[in-house]
């Protein structure tokens, strides 16, 4: 397994410190990560800003100089969006986006392009949303194959987010170039057995992405009762790997028993305990790398 740092961690979202893509590569090398995942949107590798091999050359050259493997180009797709504007070819636009990311991945020497499925739009559209994602993922997998890269599906959006549904979605797409990027944090929030799900999906996986959280119970004061009303679900806050409630040892044991030997990405993709300063992000990423190395064994 290869520890990997995802550039979204230093993309400036949630008030966090922002680095350019070249500065991010330097940061990953200094922290000791051997591989990186690069976000396929601004402020990092937008298809609008990197439309030629010449524009990508400084990134490829910097990674080679620093001894970094560029593992993955991370796409941001939602194949169920814009149902209210049926005349807009939104799925076609996103498949073309996947094609551009695949072109960039090939130029950079990356093996993988990451995508999401889609958010559910309405309860009565459950099957329609599912079918739309199946068709879009199948076409995207074919497009990625044309560029010689593998398409990876991350269990992030609503369609196929549970361990069981994720496996079902992969089976419905049924394309040899679509592989699993199964993560533990969503199943952990659902209360899923992390060992069992990792063991089952490991043979289909090319990458996993890690984050860890603490739960923060929420309450609203009810003055008429002189009491508090519990609000569900609880909030979560990101903490360094190993400091939260995720049973990462069980997840990694499932990966090992299932034969997974791919990229293990770490992301700071939400507000982090301690704030968004560069120093805190660096400390969190460094501690998390040490945890990944310990879990890999």
Image (cartoon, rainbow, N blue to C red):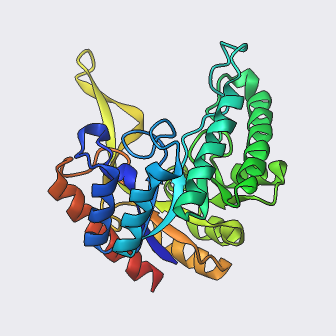
Q: Quadrant of residue 14?
A: top left
Q: Nearer the viewer, residue 179 or 220?
A: 179
Q: Do we see residue 227 in this rendering?
A: yes
Left or right: where does residue 59 sit relative to residue 169?
Answer: left
Vertical comparison of 132 with 85: above or below: below
> Which one is nearer the viewer's eye here, 199 or 215?
199
Where is 156 relative to 31, above or below?
above
Q: Is residue 191 visible?
A: no
Rendered location of residue 125, percent (x, y): 75, 24
Label tally: 0
Residue at x 59% of width, y 70% of height: 195
Q: Quadrant of the C terminus?
A: bottom left
**Quadrant housing residue 267:** bottom left
Residue 286 higher or lower than 55, as above or below: below
The residue depicted at 44 percent of the width and 49 percent of the height is 55
Relative horizontal placement of residue 203, taking residue 221 as reference (left or right): right
Residue 102, position in %: x, y?
62, 51
Name the spot of residue 182 as percent of width and height, x first.
Answer: 60, 59
Who's the residue at 65% across and 24% down the image? Answer: 121
Q: Position of residue 231 (x, y in %)?
A: 39, 31
Q: Residue furthest front?
A: 54
Residue drawn at the location 63% of the way across and 20% of the way down: 82
Residue 7, by quadrant, is bottom left
């Amino acid at each position: 397994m290869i520890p990997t740092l995802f550039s979204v961690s230093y993309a400036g979202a949630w008030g966090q410190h922002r680095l350019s893509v070249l500065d991010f590569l330097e940061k990953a090398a200094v922290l000791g990560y051997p591989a990186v995942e690069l976000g396929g949107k601004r402020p990092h590798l937008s298809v609008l800003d990197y439309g030629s091999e010449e524009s990508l050359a400084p990134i490829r050259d910097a990674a080679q100089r620093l001894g970094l493997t560029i593992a993955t180009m991370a796409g941001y797709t939602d194949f169920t969006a814009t149902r209210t504007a049926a005349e807009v070819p939104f799925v076609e636009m996103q498949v073309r986006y996947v094609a551009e990311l695949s072109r960039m991945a090939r130029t950079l020497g990356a093996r993988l392009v990451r995508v999401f499925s889609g958010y559910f739009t309405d309860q009565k559209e459950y099957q329609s949303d599912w079918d739309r994602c199946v068709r879009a993922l199948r076409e995207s997998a074919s497009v990625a194959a044309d560029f010689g890269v593998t398409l990876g599906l991350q269990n992030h959006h609503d369609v196929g987010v549970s361990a069981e549904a994720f496996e079902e979605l992969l089976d419905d797409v049924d394309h040899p170039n679509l592989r699993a990027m199964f993560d533990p944090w969503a199943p952990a929030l659902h209360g899923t057995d992390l060992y069992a799900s990792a063991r089952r999906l490991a043979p289909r996986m090319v990458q996993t992405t890690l984050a860890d959280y603490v739960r923060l119970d929420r309450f609203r004061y009810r003055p008429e009762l002189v009491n508090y009303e519990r609000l569900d679900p609880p909030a979560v806050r990101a903490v360094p790997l190993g400091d939260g409630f995720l049973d990462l040892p069980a997840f990694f044991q499932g990966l090992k028993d299932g034969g997974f030997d791919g990229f293990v990405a770490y992301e700071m993709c939400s507000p982090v305990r301690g704030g968004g300063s560069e120093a805190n992000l660096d400390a969190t990423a460094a501690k998390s790398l040490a945890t990944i190395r310990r879990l890999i064994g």
